[in-house]
């Protein structure tokens, strides 16, 4: 029986004529690897789509898992607005607003343009709202003094709340971590590590010329289009890689092994079926994984990206062959002994990997995460 701290998840996804993830100029994100340019999907993009997926396997559907919100308007909308709606003294609300914005977002938090979007769990938001309401209910002079004192002691207040709460940052922070520059003790280590996905072959892209025609314009008046533009479209077979650290995950989930297992079950489904797609209406960028493999073991994880340092042809058969050969050489050299399950639309075999369905893969990963053994 093998002890399993790490669950490694590898995948291949194919897309055609899409623009999945754009850079600041509106073009597809790219990365040079192995001496040639590849199309890329950032880890932030992938995590965002998995986090907010409206699916039967959505992370928000896990019982007992609090939600989380990333915004720079959390205090404004969830803490201060209810005070105004309750018609508290406006001068008091203004003082509370500044005090809580500063406590949450840092020294210049009362200036909206200076705030960075911050991830807060629903328990933290509820605590802040309750404290603000309590202070605002005091006589005006006392309330103003109490607000300033609360801001001064905010780190201690939030620390005490987090120590008493099971998942203060919500499930999202427990999985993907959180960094708070204004309060180091609020930081949460990521239990799920996500690599940028990239094409296993050279980039395939073209500039798509398009026009927009005015339905009410008569041809005899002007036969031309009302708008002419262009956008980039890409096609590719992407290799993706995710690692789940069971030790960190259980620590972030307060030791709840059942929730850890359910998280991994759903994560497998999300990785396989959720598209990190933009331009939905014009490209329909929907696709399922053509190949996935999960590995359980106790040794440091290692990506299989090296299988594609030399680009292969843009077929799943070629990619699976490259992966199989690379994995076999790793096994022979390092003898790390991971236990594996895989799915493949081509029924391609991987070294020491049993072929299963997506549900079988997800159930196996959930069991490994819950028990910590294979």
Image (cartoon, rainbow, N blue to C red):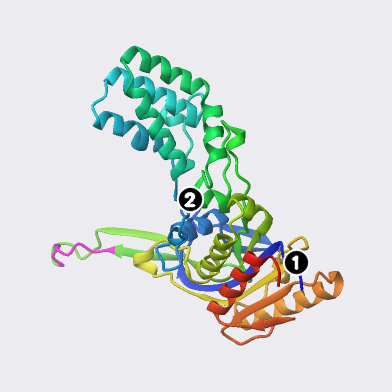
Residue 277 image offset from top left, x and y in percent: 44, 63
Sequence-first disc among 1 and 2: 1
Residue 297 image offset from top left, x and y in percent: 74, 67
Q: Which mark is residue 91?
A: none
Left/right placement of residue 3 relative to residue 118 reads right
Indicate the secondary structure of the residue bearing disc 1. Answer: loop
Q: Main secondary structure of the magenta part?
A: loop
Circle count: 2
The residue under the point 48% across, 71% down is 273
Q: Which mark is residue 25?
A: 2
Q: Nearer the viewer, mark 1 or mark 2?
A: 1
In the rendered image, which quarter contains the C terminus?
bottom right
What range is drawn magenta here? 212-219
Q: Is 91 within the magenta?
A: no
Q: Which mark is residue 3?
A: 1
Residue 227 image offset from top left, x and y in percent: 28, 58
In the displayed structure, 366 sits above or below 185; it is: below
Q: Is 217 within the magenta?
A: yes
| Distance between mark 1 and mark 2 Cα atoms | 46 Å
The residue under the point 54% across, 39% down is 164
Residue 50 image offset from top left, x and y in percent: 49, 60
Residue found at the far right of this picture: 333
Characterize the local packing of mark 1: few (<14), some (14-19) or many (20 or more) Cα atoms within 10 angstroms.
some
Indicate the secondary structure of the residue bearing disc 2. Answer: loop
Instruction: Kindly check if marks 1 and 2 are in contact, taking CB atoms under 8 A apart as contact.
Output: no
User: Can residue 319 be seen in the rendering of this structure?
Assistant: no
In the foreground, 217 or 326: 326
The residue under the point 60% across, 44% down is 188
The residue under the point 76% across, 60% down is 300
């Amino acid at each position: 029986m093998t002890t399993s701290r790490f669950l490694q998840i590898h995948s291949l996804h194919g897309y055609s004529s899409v623009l999945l993830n754009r850079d600041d100029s509106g073009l597809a994100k790219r990365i040079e690897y192995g001496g040639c340019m590849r199309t890329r999907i950032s880890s932030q993009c992938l995590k965002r789509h998995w986090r907010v997926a409206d699916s039967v396997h959505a992370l928000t559907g896990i019982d007992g898992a609090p939600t989380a919100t990333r915004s720079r308007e959390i205090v404004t909308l969830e803490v201060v607005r209810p005070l105004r709606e309750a018609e508290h003294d406006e001068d008091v609300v203004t003082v509370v607003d500044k005090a809580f914005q500063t406590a949450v977002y840092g020294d210049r938090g009362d200036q909206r343009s200076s705030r960075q979007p911050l991830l807060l769990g629903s328990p933290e938001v509820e605590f802040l709202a309750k404290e603000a309401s309590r202070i605002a209910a005091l006589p005006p002079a006392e309330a103003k003094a109490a607000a300033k004192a609360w801001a001064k002691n905010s780190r201690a207040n939030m620390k005490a709340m987090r120590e008493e709460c099971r998942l203060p940052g919500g499930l999202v922070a427990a999985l993907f971590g959180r960094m708070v520059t204004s309060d180091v003790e609020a930081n949460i280590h990521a239990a799920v590590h996500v690599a940028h996905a990239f094409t296993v072959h050279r980039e395939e892209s073209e500039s798509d010329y398009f026009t927009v025609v005015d339905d009410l314009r008569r041809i005899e008046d002007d036969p031309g289009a009302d708008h002419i533009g262009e956008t980039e479209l890409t096609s590719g077979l992407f290799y993706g890689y995710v690692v789940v650290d069971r030790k960190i995950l259980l620590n972030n989930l307060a030791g709840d092994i059942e929730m850890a297992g359910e998280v991994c079950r759903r994560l497998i489904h999300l990785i396989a079926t959720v598209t990190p797609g933009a331009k939905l209406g014009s490209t329909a960028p929907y696709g399922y994984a053509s190949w996935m493999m999960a590995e359980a073991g106790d040794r440091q994880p290692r990506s299989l990206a090296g299988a594609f340092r030399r680009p292969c042809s843009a077929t799943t058969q070629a990619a699976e062959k490259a992966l199989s050969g690379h994995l076999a050489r790793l096994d022979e050299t390092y003898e790390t002994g991971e236990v594996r399950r895989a799915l493949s639309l081509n029924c391609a075999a991987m070294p020491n990997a049993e072929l299963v369905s997506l549900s079988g893969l997800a159930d196996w990963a959930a069991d490994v995460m819950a028990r910590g053994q294979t």
